[in-house]
Amino acid sequence: MKRSMTSTSALVFAVSLAAVLMTTSVRAADFYAGKTIRMLVGYNAGTGNDAYMRVLSRHLADHIPGKPLIVPENRPGAASLVMMNYLYNVAPRDGTAIGLPSANLVTEPLFDNPQAKYDAKKFTWLGSMSRDTALCLTWHTSGINTLADAKKREVLVGSTGVASNSTLFPKILDALFGTKLKPIVGYPDSSAIGLAMQRGELAGYCSFPLNAIRSAHPEWIDKHLVNVLVQLTTRKNPALSNVPLIMDLATDDATREALALVFGDQEMGRPLAGPPGVPADRVAILRRAFEDTLADPAFLADAKTTGVAIDGPINGKQVEEIIDALYATPKTVVARIQRLKEDSNKR
């Protein structure tokens, strides 16, 4: 008799739990009906990140129950730092605000940047539309055709901010490989840097992702308007097999570890995130919607037409694993990069 009562109780509990879970799921699905989701990007319209944001915004709602309205929003400033601080500290935490953080800025708290007012590991990571291959390049009339040329004289390269890759990458190349790259800070975005290169105001740009070039300036590669000096990533892109990979230029393990920290974020080139504390059921909906969108033929066709490359997309868990690996970097390696950054600032 006791065994029968126990079985009955277990059955009642299981049925009740299923009902609760079903009700929660229904409520989560109903939440987005009639809602508006703001999709934020930290750069001006016309830039690479903006192009990715807008093509995603046109299709993501088709895969969210309730089909909310998705409104693109540009919040430029400090190479996307302004948007990331807003997303983390101010944006509503109910699943109605998502953004495209700059992958390179996820490690700024690791380097004790006081302007980075967020914990990168606590963002609600939904996935990434592609992996990146950052390039150090120069305009074809600059006279700087190879990395060796950049060691012979000062080379002015554009930068969108002191915390951006466009400042950090040239400094790392100078410190570790003896180049004479000088970042000129103050350009609002990659489009402005591209125009400055064409005017002869700048010689180059040392952080432009290949996918961004393909979407915004495909003629640069096709018509040989730029010289690609080196691939600034951890894995060589087969499309640029004749361009050296920065990792292959390292001559010792310590340098390789330092480069892995600096360029490791390229593995999550175009991440999508919400603020911390988004309810778990809505996170599940958004992650599923993101993955379904990236497999949607209509989205892929739009991306191709727009010139946005969907190259090696990854899910939210994989983004978290990349960030965890970056934050597991030995403190001695972090300190070395920190010193390099500080020493470069004194020049």
Image: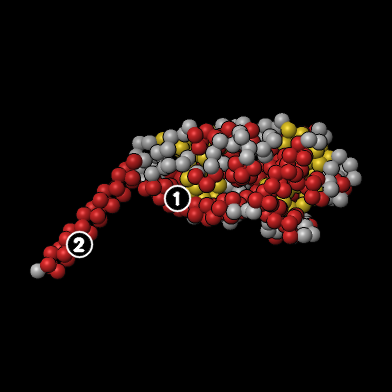
Q: Which residue extends farthest front?
A: 332
Q: Is residue 222 above or below residue 189?
A: below
Horizontal and vertical percent position of residue 140: 83, 44
Horizontal and vertical percent position of residue 124: 47, 45
Residue wearing tag 2: 10
* Label 1 secondary element: helix
Residue wearing tag 1: 287
Q: Nearer the viewer, residue 275 or 145?
A: 275
Q: Is residue 171 above or below residue 247?
A: above
Q: Nearer the viewer, residue 15 or 44?
A: 15
Q: Is residue 10 left or right of residue 231?
A: left
Q: Is residue 95 left or right of residue 267?
A: left
- Quadrant containing the C terminus is top right
> Within the image, what quadrant is residue 184 found in?
top right
Q: Is residue 311 above or below residue 78?
A: below
Checking the image for residue 1, the label placed there is none
Amino acid carrying label 1: it is Arg
Amino acid carrying label 2: it is Ala
Mark 1 or 2: in front is 2
Q: Residue at x 25, y 51 (%)?
A: 20
Task: For residue 265, say whether it is visible.
Answer: yes
Q: Residue at x 58, y 47 (%)?
A: 270
- Label 1 close to label 2 by CB (< 8 Å): no
